[in-house]
Image (cartoon, grey):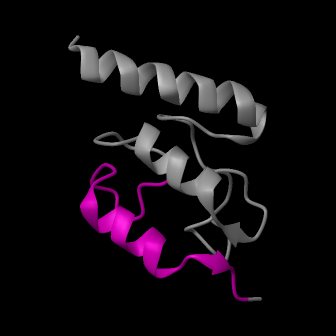
Amino acid sequence: MTTRQSTLAGLLAVIAVTLGPSLIVRGSPRPSLPPCPWDCADFDGVVAVPDLLALLSQWGLPGSCDFDGGGVAVPDLLKLLANWGVCPP
């Protein structure tokens, strides 16, 4: 592991501890598909920072932030950013 990778891993660990159990990390299954799939971390009806952090922690893997079934990648990031904010009712 490079210094950069270990720094990123340490940062993600601090974020996960700070956010607690509301953050779903890589590989965690998604509950039944909500009307707003981009709310992929805490399912609070808002696409926000916890969802972005969950997406980054799942990078390259399947998980709750994998919107197209191909593993979390750039298209999933772009979809999340395009849907930033309060989810439609």
Residue 38 against residue 87 in the figure, above or below:
above
Visible in this render: residue 64? no
Q: Position of residue 43 (x, y in %)?
A: 73, 59
The quadrant holding residue 24 is top right
Q: Residue at x 71, y 70 (%)?
A: 46
The quadrant holding residue 67 is bottom left
Which stretch appears magenta? 64-88
Along the viewing direction, whichever of 14 and 66 lies nearer the viewer: 14
Circle count: 0
Q: Quadrant of the C terminus?
A: bottom right
Q: Residue at x 37, y 63 (%)?
A: 77
Q: Residue at x 46, y 44 (%)?
A: 63
Residue found at the far bottom of this picture: 89
- Is residue 74 magenta-colored? yes
Residue found at the far top of this picture: 1
Q: Position of residue 65 (x, y in %)?
A: 48, 54
Visible in this render: residue 88? yes
Q: Quadrant of the N terminus?
A: top left
Residue found at the far left of this picture: 2
Q: Position of residue 27 (x, y in %)?
A: 48, 34
74 vs 54, left or right, is left
79 vs 73, left or right, is right
Residue 25 against residue 70 in the figure, above or below:
above
Along the viewing direction, whichever of 30 and 11 lies nearer the viewer: 11
Q: Position of residue 18 (x, y in %)?
A: 73, 31
Along the viewing direction, whichever of 3 and 71 lies nearer the viewer: 3
Q: Residue at x 45, y 38 (%)?
A: 57
30 vs 82, left or right, is right
- Is residue 61 magenta-colored? no
